[in-house]
Image: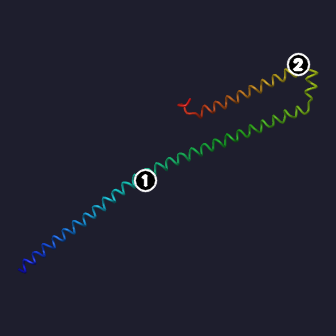
Amino acid sequence: MFKIYLIIAFIGAIGGGYAYHITTVAKFEAGIAKLEANNRTLKENQVQLELAVNTAEASLKAAEENAKKQGEAMNKLTLKNNQLQKDKDNAMQIFKDHNLTRLARAKPGMIEKRANNKTAAVFRELENDTKELMDVDDDDVPATEQ
């Protein structure tokens, strides 16, 4: 009888060990599956973050290029503004130095011809400047919008 109890205890121990083994392996497999799912999620997140970083870097580079272009354009405009200010100051000095009303009454043909020629020149410059601005605006618009 002792042998029977010993055999039953041995079979019980083997059964208990097998049950423990199955339970432990199931827990480990569930943990591994969870870790693998987390790993996939982390890899997907990494791809999305890399894409976001690349987009941000491209945006930053474009913004820096635009800032550089704006700075260059501002410098050009400042130089042109300074030149125009000098031209205006010269013209104002001419008006201060000469009594155009008296000269126009004394020699109307001479003043009218010069005034008309200068007015035409100013309008030509204005048209050229406007064309330049329109060309710049057309260059900035993508081809699909034109």
- Quadrant where the C terminus sits is top right
Query: Dot 1: what SS?
Result: helix
Report the label total: 2
Pointer 2: residues within 10 angstroms few (<14), some, or many (20+)?
A: few
Q: Residue at x 44, y 50 (%)?
A: 48
Residue 57 lies left or right of residue 20; in this view the side is right
Looking at the picture, which amino acid does disc 2 mark? Gly
29 vs 81, nearest the viewer: 29
Q: Mark 2 sits on what residue? A: 109
The correct choice, above or below, for 79 with respect to 8 in the image is: above
Sooner in the amino-acid sequence: mark 1 or mark 2: 1
Q: Residue at x 40, y 52 (%)?
A: 44
Q: Residue at x 55, y 31 (%)?
A: 145
Residue 91 disc label: none
Query: Dot 2: what SS?
Result: helix
Q: Mark 1 sits on what residue? A: 46
Q: Position of residue 72 (x, y in %)?
A: 67, 41
Q: Position of residue 143 (x, y in %)?
A: 54, 31
Q: Position of residue 82 (x, y in %)?
A: 77, 39
